[in-house]
Amino acid sequence: MAFNENLAAGQSQPVGARRASRRRALHLATRTGLVAILTLAPLGLRSSVSALEFPRVIVLPGATSAEGIAAGRGSTFYAGDLFNGDIFRGDLRSGAVERFIHPPAGRMAAGLKADLRHGLLFVAGAATGQAYVYDLETGADLATFQLGAFVNDVVLTDDAAWFTDSVLPRLYRVPTYPGGSVGTLVVTGPAADVSAFPGLNGIAATPDGTRLIVSHSNLGAIFTVNPRTGASVPIEGLVVPTVDGILFEHGRLYAMQNFLNQIAEIRLSPDLSTGTVEMIITSADFEVPTTVAKFGDRLAVVNSKIDTGFPPTAATYDVVIVKARGGQERDRDDR
């Protein structure tokens, strides 16, 4: 898929045939490894995450804040500067990082996800109420969508990017294919609570896209949402105070608990009706971590450092790498 770089806010359309042809050629080259090698060589980015050694902390050079993180190919990651919208691209194994995208003034960058199939990067625009789409290889600005009030996080399904709104009981669907239309899903049931900010926050999806999973920060709860009707149902057995970004993989949910400086590793039942916290992962390097991406048996999280203020005033902002199912474990009753 491609988006026109000169779109008005909230509109999208396919780029012309010549651009589409170039995109197909780019995808073909990427599949053969040529483009990936040429593009990522300056950073020392590699195609595998099987090495034993990883840095513990990776500083985002020049960042003024931090919020979102996304997994790219191999050990490549993307991380966002919340308050100025910059996107950093780095390598988890080497620790090399560069500022990849410096967007127009006035943008923000909360949650983000890399669409490897289509070569796109989807970014939630936080208090701007917008979502942005960038070219994953070049960083080109492809599209802007005006969605809602506080667009906080994003997840990808086979055919769409779904965004949460932390002020309104809404989810927004942006198609990842040409000719699709942007949609708004009104959330009903207990997850629709908007009595305090932030409400809906992190978002994940089942592999087949038939159910969405959302975190609700104010309620300290996790819900499933029907993507057709908007009906929400709580996942029973879970109490996750200060829950933020979430990640779902192979029946396991990783839930960031930002001000508790920990990750709850949760086993969900096959029907997603119940959950059990099996482990709490912590690190002395955590400082209000907000979002998480998984690379093999490693988790990469972003330190927002908003304990220093909002906007934060820390000298540096960073990504912390920990082992999944290998962090410090505490009994659930001690949380």
Image (spheres, rainbow, N blue to C red):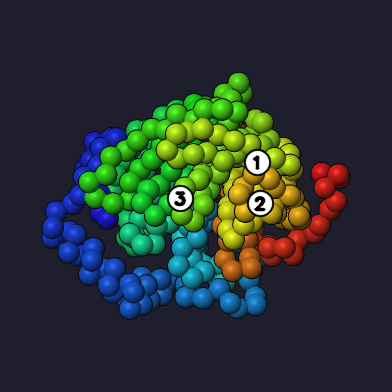
User: Do labels 2 and 1 touch, CB within 8 Å?
Assistant: yes
- The disc, 2 or 3, on the residue closer to the chain's N-terminal end is 3
Q: How many numbered badges does the structure rendering display?
A: 3
- In the picture of the structure, the residue carrying the numbered disc 1 is 235
The picture places residue 13, in percent across and down from the top left corner, at 21, 45
- For mark 3, give the secondary structure: loop
Mark 2 burial class by Cα count in 10 Å: few <14, some 14-19, many 20+: many
User: Please, what is the three-letter code of the amino acid marked with disc 2?
Assistant: Leu
Assess whether mark 3 and mark 1 are in contact (beta carbons under 8 angstroms).
no
From the top left corner, tell me how far across and down residue 57 is, in percent.
64, 61
The quadrant of the rendering that contains the C terminus is top right
Going by the image, does 186 lie left or right of 217? left
Q: In this view of the protein, which residue sits in the foreground, 56 or 149?
A: 149
Cβ–Cβ under 8 Å for marks 2 and 3:
no
Q: Which of pointers 1 and 3 lies earlier in the amino acid sequence?
A: 3
Q: Quadrant of residue 145?
A: top left
Q: Which quarter of the rendering shows the N terminus?
A: bottom left
Q: Secondary structure at mark 1?
A: loop
Q: Amino acid at mark 3?
A: Gly
Q: Residue furthest front?
A: 271
Camera-nearest residue between 36 and 2: 2
Q: Is residue 173 visible?
A: yes
Residue drawn at x 65%, y 48% is 255
Q: Residue at x 34, y 74 (%)?
A: 31
Numbered circle sitting on residue 268: 2
Disc on the earlier residue, 2 or 1: 1
Q: What is the C-alpha distance between the residues marked 1 and 3?
A: 17 Å
- Residue linked to disc 3: 209
Q: Is residue 65 above or below residue 165?
A: below
Horizontally, is 177 left or right of 236 in the view? left
Residue that appears at 38% across and 32% down: 184
